[in-house]
Amino acid sequence: MKPECVITGMGLVLPCGTGIEAASASWRSQQPCFRQLPPELGSGLGAICDVSTAGIIPPILNRRLDRVSRFAWVATHHALLDADLDPTQIRDRIGLAVGSVTGGIEASEQFLRPYLAKGPAGASPMIFPNSVAVAISGHISTAFGLRGCSTTQLAREACFFAALDQAMRWLRLGMADVMVVIGTDGLSPLFGELLQRSRLSARHGLPEVGSRRGLLPGEGAQAFILETRDRAETRRARIRASIRGLTSCAPATPDPKARGLALAEAASALTPIPPDAWIAGSSGHPILDEVECALRSRHPRWPQPRFPKTLWGEFCGSGGQLLAAAAVDLAPSVLITAPASLGAQFATAMEKP
Amino acid sequence: MKRVVVTGLGFVSSLGLDAKTTWAGMLEGRSGIRPLRHFATPREAIQIAAEVDLPEDAPPTRHTSRCERLAMLALEEALRQAGLDLDSGDPRRRGVFHASTAAGMPVAEAYILARQAGERGKATEPLYQHCSIITDRVAERIQAMGPRSTVMNACSSSLTTIAQAWERLAIGELDFAVAGGADVLCHTTFGGFSSLKAMDPNPCRPFSVDRAGLNLGEGAVQLVLEPLDLAQARGAEILGEVVGYGASSDAHHPTAPHPEGIGAARAMDMALQVGRLHAEEVDLISAHGTATPANDGVECLAIHRVLGSAARGVSVTSSKSQFGHTLGAAGALATAVALLALRDQVVSPTLRLDQPDPACDMDCTPLIPRERKLRAALVNAFAFGGNNMCLALRRWE
C-alpha cells in the first residue's frame, strides 16, 4: 500500500489576490479576473497578479527576480507559514518540484532582444541565469534553505501536475520527508504576442468553454506543502486535503476526442464513484475544451465541471490553479482533470477532512 | 524493487553520429571541439564549439528542429540495438523521459530577429517547438502511451530523466522506457555563457591547473531501459545496470556551486545508498568536469568527501574535453560514456590535462585511455540553481 500524501500548507498567488481567503472569495463569486494588460506585459486582456513582496523578498533580490520566481517565492513563503513548518530543521529532507510553462521566457526575451541587436555588448550576465526554468527552483531553494531533491517539469498545460507526480513519488520512495510543489507562470510581451498571433488567445470577450473563442492568459503561483499522512499526523500538522490518487495518460494521437476518452478512462480508475465536485482544465482553448467534452460524455453522472482557467487564466501556475480551486472548493471530494493539447494529461482525486 | 538494465544506447556527438564511432574517437584521443562551422555568431570573440555534423542530405524541415533531429537519430540507434518489438506489448507501460534546454530556442531567436528586422516572423513555431515536443516525438515513434516527462533542470536535466525512468521501472510500472537528452547551440546559451565569462576561447582543459572555462557543445543520447527479467526473457544484450541515483540542491547561489561541494556530495552519497554501493566498489566517476575554475575543484572536493580514502583508487574522466558542455544532454552523454567504459573495461581520457590541478588530486585519466577493472560508476551532473544529480551504474557481467 502506497503511503498517502497530504497537503499541510498552501500559498496562493492568483490574479484575484494573494492568500487562501482571496482565492476562496474569488471561487465563490466566479467573477473572472481579466483586465487590459499594461504594455510591459503585452497587449489585450489577461489575468495579472499584483503581488506584494514587502517583508518577504529582500528588495535587492527582488529586483533581480523575474515574475515567475517572484510569484513562486511569495507563494512558498505563505505555504510554509500555513504548514507551520520551519524548513531549517529538516533542510536536507525538503525537496522541491516546480512546474512552469513560462519559466525562463521573460528573462530569455530580456536577454535576447539587446543581445541580438547589439551583440555581446548587449548581453547581461545578470539576466541570463534566469533564462532557464530551473532558475526558479534555484531561487526558492536558496531563499528557504531547501536542500533536498529538486526538479522542474514541463508538460504544456499540465506542468504543475507533472511536478506533483514527481513530488509524490519522492515522498513515497523516501527520497524526501516534505515536498514543496509549485506551479508558477508569468506574463511577458513575447509570450502574449505568440499566443495572440497563433490565434490561441480570445480576441473578443472572455474565455468561455466550448465557444472556441480561445483562451486568455493568466499568471500566478501556487505552492503546496506535501507530506505523507503519517509524518503530518506525527507532527500534528493541520491536514488541508489528501491527494487520494494521481494518474496520467498520454494518448499517441493528438485527436481531442481520443485524448478525452483516454483521460476519462484514467479518471475512472481514480474515482469509481462520482466525486462531489469536478474541477476541469478547459480554458476556451478548442482542443482542451473538446478533450473535456469527450470526458463529460463518458461520465454523465459526474457533477457539472467548473473551470478555474476561465476566471484566473490559462497557465497561471501551469495547472496549479486547478488544485488551488479544488482546495478552496467546499466539496469534500473533488476530481481534478488537467487535459493538455499534446503529451501527458493528468487526473487527480482530492479529499478533505 | 526490480533490477533495471540498459539494453539500447544511441549516441550522437561531435565525434560521430553513433556510439561506435563516438567511442572509438574518444579512445583515439580525438576532440570534437573545433572552429564553428554550422552555428554563426560572428560578433562573439569565441569561435569554437563541439558541433554535430548532421548529414547534409537531411536539411531541417518545418516543424523539425535541429535538436529534434539529433534526438531522433540517437533514438533510432538505441532502438536498433535494443531490438524491441514495438508492435506488441502494452503501450501504456512504455514511458518517455526526455530533456533539453535549448530545443526551441533557435526558433524563438529567429522569431525575435525577424520582428527586430520588421518582418512578421512565424509565431506558431516557437510555441510548437516547445521542449516537450521532442518527448512527444519520441513517444510517437515508440508508440508509447505511458508516462511522459520533460525535465528542465538545465545541465542536470538528462541525468534526471534517466533517474525518473529507473524509478518507474524499478517499481514495476513500466515494461520499458526511453530516457535521454539532446541539445544544440543557440544564441541564448552562447551569448549567456560568454557574458558570464565562463567560456574558454580555446579547447577546454578539465581538472587542469590553468583551466579557463567551458566550451559549448551539441549532442544527443537516448537509452532504452528495461527491467532485468524482461530483458533476459527476450535475450537482449545488456550494456549495464542502473542501480540508483541521488539528488540534492545546494541552496547557495544561482550559478556558482557550493564552495565546499556539500550539495554535490549529498547527491553522490544518496546515489551510493540507493544503489547499495560501497565507496570501494566505485572505480569510475564520469564527472561533470566542465573545466570552469569553480566546478572542477568543488567536484573533486565532493568526491573526496564521499569516497574518503577510496577516492585514491577511482578513475575520473570528463567527456566535456571531447564534447564540450552539451547542457541538457550532458548527463546522458556522461552516462553513455560510463556505460561504454564499464562494458569495455577502459576509461576514456580527459584531454589536454597536461598540468593537473593539485586541488584535483585524483587520477583524472589524463590524455590517454586507461584499461582497468571497472565494477561500478557514478555519473555527475550539476546545474544552475544548485541542482545536483548523481546516477549509480554497475557493470553487467
Image (tube, helix red, strand yellow):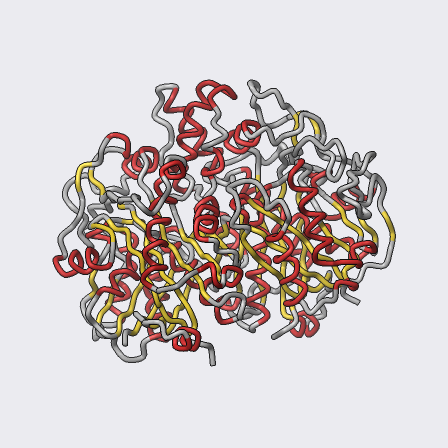
Residue at x-position 43% and y-position 58%: A163
> Can the viewer see residue B40?
yes
Left or right, A154 with reference to B118: right
Where residue A195 sits, quadrant-wise, is top left
Task: From the top left corner, tell me how far across and down residue B121 is, in percent.
Answer: 37, 28
Residue depicted at x 63% and y 70%: B227
- The image position of residue B130, as x and y in percent, is 44, 44
* x 37%, y 49%: residue: A73
Q: Residue B319 at what x, y percent from top left?
A: 72, 43
In this view of the protein, which residue sits in the foreground, B52 or B26? B26
Residue A181 placement: quadrant: bottom left
Residue B38 position (above or below residue B137): above
Say whether residue B216 is left or right of residue B370. Answer: left
Q: Which residue lies furthest to the right in this view?
A: B371
Give x and y (percent) for residue A166: 47, 62
B289 or B190: nearer the eye? Answer: B289
Is A227 rendered above or below residue A187?
below
Task: Give above or below for B349 relative to B303.
Answer: above
Q: Nearer the viewer, residue B253 or A313?
A: B253
Position of the C terminus of chain A, as image quadrant, is bottom left
Q: Residue at left 49%, top 63%? A: A90
Q: Quadrant of residue B128?
A: top left
Left or right side of A55 for B8: right
Q: Can residue B132 be seen in this view?
A: no
Q: How many labels does the image show?
A: 0
Is B350 or A255 nearer to us in this picture? B350
